[in-house]
Image (spheres, rainbow, N blue to C red):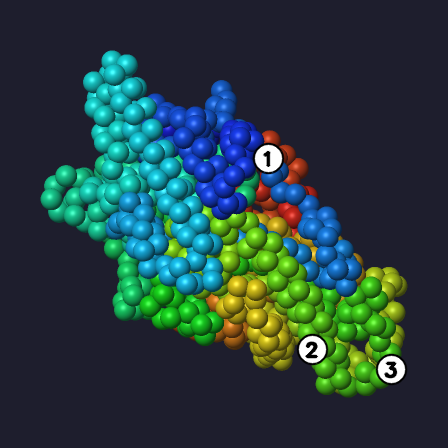
């Protein structure tokens, strides 16, 4: 890390900010003085008014510019504080009582969506090229079309927004020139003049250098901040050309990438403890299926290791042709103790996307967003997480323990495991109906926003061609995803019921139900037997692993019977997310047959419930690999806690790389790692002031351990630590 990057890093690590209050102020200022235009045109002009008037900031020494003015730089580095909010389980807006109750009782919960914009098009034609596309579509409209006027207003609105953002970058160019004229340092003066030239060209036009490409990428992200996409793919042609013609050195390229990484971090500030934003994707495959990794992939990993930042969260896409050297290099970066990179398997995700209706060429171009949501880069509004579903509570509903959600159940009529399973299927269908009703209501509300999110519509493929907004079905792909939480707990519970009640006949279903209603009180001996002597998912036991697979198969099919508001399909994921739904659903759910007590958390990912994977990491991953990943195209994570000693030697690094390769070849989809021992975590909980930089993987994201809730810290401590 050179002196410039060290200084910028020091500044951003001392920065704290708030959402730009000028945004709402300027919007209100515009709307107060206009009333005679269509809603979508007024919305576009309000956005334009903001770009024309928002404050500009260029910090000392930075090479990539564009910042919020509402950031305070403190004298000392800030301790990341809790930025997680508890779920209230209130319905997000008024809805029918029969749907609202599924929220209040903790059966379903809403989530946020993520976006990856069409960086490739912006880099190839610029915003002026987007304006040309809009003009061509406008000329193709027929006055005879019933919705011609509506489409024309939408397209004109997109043009207004695009022109305004070009004006915004030109304002930055003017500002850089003004600063250069006041600058006495000749080197910095020259840099500011170059920055001005960069801003004059991008994002209006395609960049013609690696530096300008990095600036264009940042301006594009600044326009719609969420996920940076496949950085090593869309920046590589500019890197390769400049390296070959001698106008760029590898060191300066690393410096520019470092500036870009620091911009991603600065966007949310150091006090935002959640890294489930700005998920950046490396590696993967080309449109024809070949390995896509390149020299820039390695350079991005070098920068990630050097900077040791919480964001951007970095994910590496693996395939059989990924070089062993690249995988080992990525594992080495885990030594930085920031929790990334995480790893995902193209050979499972791409077929799963194709199975969900994505064309193979587009499926190969997926990128990561949020915690680990898979999005077709720049071509989709995939509802990356529509919401979460409490799977163990589905069993309690089937057993009649949740009267607010369904009719009572006569347990004496459930005299076989098959009848119990039929009840579970019925409960799944009931919950899927509630989830669908919520999705349709939510997505209709989002579609009603003027232009269906104009910013996203401008930079998502096919919205211009379809003359329809991002949230209105205008994108090429429009699938909606629901995440099933606690699959391992449900599978474990069903095994216990099958063996204990229907095979051993040791207890009646009524008797066991009473034990659960009393939270296992007075039955600790039986609970310990359940925990220690019955099969549990994550131990390579075919009996329970097959049940877990069947749960996914059946529930995915039940969801697919419905059609989302925007079209496409409902898909299934298993991600607890930055919402930490394995904790939140757990505290709303009574005792379950797997030995779990009321209020305890569920399994944190697609892996085993905490502490119940007792036959080693290979056995746990074998269980995961048996699951039908072809039905899980997005939002799937597997948290693995390993002894930190493996990061201390080349042999240990090689073993981790081999573990990843072996799991992916056997059918696994995703892996992310923690490398802390129990004693250190307990010490950090007792003395948080001494461990501000202790980073952990939580549920698809990384965060400072000391920033987490107490019960979330306890859940991480309870996870099984594996050795080879």
- Looking at the rendered structure, which numbered label has been put on residue 520? none
Residue 607 place in picture, x, y as percent: 57, 64
Q: Mark 1 points at which residue?
A: 81
Quadrant in the rendering for residue 171 = top left
Q: How far separated are the C-alphas under marks 3 and 1?
A: 51 Å
Question: Is residue 572 something one can see in this rendering?
Answer: no
Residue 368 place in picture, x, y as percent: 44, 55
Question: Is residue 83 something one can see in this rendering?
Answer: yes
Mark 1 residue crowding within 10 angstroms, few (<14) / some (14–19) / many (20+): some
Which element type, helix, strand or loop, lies under badge 2?
Answer: helix
- Image point (24%, 45%), residue name: 206
Closer to viewer: mark 2 or mark 3: 2
Which element type, helix, strand or loop, lies under badge 3?
Answer: helix
> Which residue lies most toward the left here?
245
> Which residue lies most toward the front here?
144
Residue 488 place in picture, x, y as percent: 63, 68
Closer to viewer: mark 1 or mark 2: 2
Q: Mark 3 points at which residue?
A: 412
Q: Mark 2 points at which residue?
A: 425
Could you tell whether 17 is left or right of 6 in the image?
A: right
Q: How far separated are the C-alphas under marks 1 and 2?
A: 42 Å
Q: Earlier in the sequence, mark 3 or mark 1?
A: 1
């Amino acid at each position: 890390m050179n002196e410039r990057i060290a200084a910028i890093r020091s500044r951003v690590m001392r920065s704290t900010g708030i959402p730009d209050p000028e945004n709402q102020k300027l919007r209100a200022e515009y709307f107060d003085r206009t009333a005679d235009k269509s809603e979508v045109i007024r919305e576009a002009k309000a956005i334009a008014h903001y770009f024309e008037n928002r404050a500009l900031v260029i910090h000392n020494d930075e090479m990539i510019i564009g910042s919020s003015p509402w950031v305070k730089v403190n004298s000392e580095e800030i301790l990341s504080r809790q930025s997680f909010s508890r779920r209230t389980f209130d319905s997000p807006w008024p809805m029918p009582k029969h749907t609202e109750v599924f929220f209040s009782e903790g059966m379903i919960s809403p989530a946020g969506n993520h976006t990856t914009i069409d960086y490739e098009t912006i880099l190839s034609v610029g915003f002026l090229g987007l304006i040309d596309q809009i003009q061509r579509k406008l000329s193709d409209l027929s006055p005879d079309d019933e919705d011609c006027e509506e489409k024309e207003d939408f397209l004109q609105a997109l043009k207004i927004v695009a022109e305004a953002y070009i004006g915004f970058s030109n304002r930055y160019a003017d500002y850089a020139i003004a600063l250069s004229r006041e600058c006495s340092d000749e080197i910095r003066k020259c840099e500011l003049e170059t920055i001005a030239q960069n801003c004059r060209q991008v994002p209006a036009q395609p960049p013609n250098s690696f530096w300008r490409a990095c600036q264009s990428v940042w301006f594009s992200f600044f326009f719609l901040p969420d996920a940076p996409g496949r950085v090593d793919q869309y920046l590589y042609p500019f890197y390769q050309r400049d390296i070959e013609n001698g106008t760029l050195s590898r060191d300066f390229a690393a410096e520019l990438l470092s500036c870009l990484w620091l911009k991603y971090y600065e966007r949310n500030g150091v006090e935002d403890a959640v890294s489930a934003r700005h998920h950046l994707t490396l590696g993967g495959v080309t449109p024809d299926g070949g390995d896509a990794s390149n020299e820039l992939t390695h350079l991005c990993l070098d920068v990630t290791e050097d900077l040791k930042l919480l964001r951007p969260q970095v994910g590496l896409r693996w395939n059989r042709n990924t070089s062993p050297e690249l995988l080992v290099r990525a594992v080495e970066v885990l030594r930085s103790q920031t929790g990334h990179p995480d790893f995902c398997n193209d050979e499972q995700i791409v077929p799963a996307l194709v199975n969900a209706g994505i064309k193979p060429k587009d499926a190969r171009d997926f990128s990561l967003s949020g915690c680990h949501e898979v999005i077709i880069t720049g071509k989709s509004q995939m509802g990356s997480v529509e919401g979460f579903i409490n799977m163990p509570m589905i069993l309690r509903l089937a057993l009649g323990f949740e009267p607010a959600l369904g009719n009572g159940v006569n347990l004496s009529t459930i005299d076989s495991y098959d009848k119990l399973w039929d009840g579970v299927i019925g409960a799944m269908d009931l919950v899927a109906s509630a989830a669908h009703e919520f999705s349709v209501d939510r997505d209709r509300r989002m579609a009603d926003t003027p232009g269906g999110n104009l910013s996203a519509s401008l930079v998502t493929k096919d919205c211009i061609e379809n003359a329809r907004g991002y949230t209105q079905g205008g994108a090429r792909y429009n699938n909606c995803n629901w995440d099933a939480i606690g699959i391992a707990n449900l599978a474990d519970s069903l095994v216990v019921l099958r063996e204990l009640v229907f095979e051993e006949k040791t207890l009646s279903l009524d008797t066991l139900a009473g034990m659960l209603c009393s939270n296992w009180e007075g039955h600790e001996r039986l609970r310990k037997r359940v925990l220690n002597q019955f099969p549990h998912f994550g131990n390579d036991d075919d009996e329970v692993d097959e049940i877990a697979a069947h749960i996914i198969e059946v529930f995915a099919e039940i969801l697919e019977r419905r059609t989302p508001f925007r079209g496409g399909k409902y898909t299934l994921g298993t991600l607890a997310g930055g919402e930490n739904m394995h904790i939140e659903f757990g505290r709303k759910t009574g005792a379950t047959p797997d030995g779990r007590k009321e209020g305890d958390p569920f399994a944190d990912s697609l892996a085993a419930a905490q502490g119940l994977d007792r036959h080693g990491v290979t056995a746990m991953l074998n269980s995961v690999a048996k699951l039908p990943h072809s039905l899980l195209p997005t939002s799937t994570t597997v948290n693995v806690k390993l002894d930190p000693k493996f990061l201390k030697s080349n042999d240990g690094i090689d073993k981790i790389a081999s573990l990843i390769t072996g799991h992916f070849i056997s059918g696994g989809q995703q892996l992310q790692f923690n490398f802390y021992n129990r004693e250190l975590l307990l010490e950090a909980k007792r003395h948080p002031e001494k461990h501000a930089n202790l980073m952990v993987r939580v549920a698809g994201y990384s965060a400072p351990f000391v920033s987490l809730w107490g019960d979330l810290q306890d859940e991480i401590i309870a996870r099984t630590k594996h050795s080879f």
